[in-house]
Amino acid sequence: MDKVVSYVCDLCKENHSSRRTRHKIYCRVSSLESSFSCAECSTPFSMGYEVTDREQSSYACEECDKVFYSRKGLRCHSYEHSNAWPYQCKQCGKGFGTKFLLKNHMPKHSNERHYKCDICHFTFKFKRALTFHMNIHDEQNPFRCEQCNKSCQSKGNLEIHMIKHSNIRPHKCDICHSTFKHKAYLITHMNIHDEQNPFRCEHCNKSCRDKSRLEMHMTKHSDERPHTCSICPSKFKQKKHLTRHMKMHINLSF
């Protein structure tokens, strides 16, 4: 029997309970040429999820309702609830269900990069990282953006990239109602509303969302102007101001 396929938008997917989704498979889909219609709210969207029924499995976690295809998968998952990991990293304390997973983790604590790209000479700690990277050099790369032809390393990276071509901003701040395309941006933004924000200016108490924004802000409290124009004697505190200034010289030359 053919599988039944439907589509849901990001918002409806986020509102689904774990009990409702444990027997479903959600696969990310995107298209800039046509829109999908959400089976829940009927809203048209260009990026969301394809939904199909998952094959019945008898290995369900009693703690969180996650479903697994094998008893081994359920057993490894159970350590997340009990914290009784059979293998544990001595350097960071992270636990693993198998010795193989612990072995794969250990290169993270080393600066050695044994895997090298023969084309651009990038180096990697993990072989799988090199394998993903090689897609960039493949003319037949299946993870190439149809909109701008950018070549991505993996399906996940392509999905993240496709958000740049969309106006959808599903991640919303509950305090100031700012919206963001990526959840990571929302998390960083929340520092602004945190009284214990480590990126708060000691001079004027301005709260910045990250270290780079704080460093940029601190130039306002300094007389230093490290960015100098190569055409005229003008100097600027921030690089973006120099860039804007250089456009003036370009326009005057025409």
Image (tube, rainbow, N blue to C red):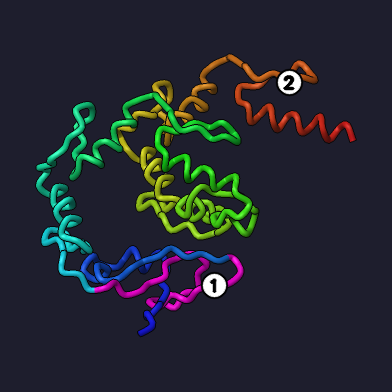
Name the residue rendered at 54%, 35% in the picture.
117
Up/down of 201 relative to 4, above or below: above
Residue 243 visible in this rendered orientation of the protein = yes
Q: Secondary structure at mark 2?
A: loop
* Frontmost residue, 73 versus 209: 73
For the C terminus, the quadrant is: top right
Please give left or right for residue 52 compared with residue 131 in the image.
Answer: left
Name the residue rendered at 40%, 40% in the picture.
188
Q: Amino acid at mark 1?
A: Ser
Name the residue rendered at 19%, 28% in the picture.
90
Identify the residue under disc 1: 35
Name the residue rendered at 38%, 28% in the picture.
200
* Frontmost residue, 63 versus 107: 107
Up/down of 150 relative to 93, above or below: below
Report which quarter residue 57 is drawn in.
bottom left
Identify the residue under disc 2: 229
Residues drawn in magenta: 32-55
Q: Residues within 10 Å of mark 2 (few under 14, many from 20)?
A: some
Up/down of 165 relative to 99, above or below: below
Where is residue 3 drawn, in percent x and y?
A: 37, 79
Where is residue 31 drawn, in percent x and y?
A: 55, 66
The Cα–Cα distance between marks 2 and 1, rounded to whole angstroms, is 47 Å
Q: Amino acid at mark 2?
A: Cys
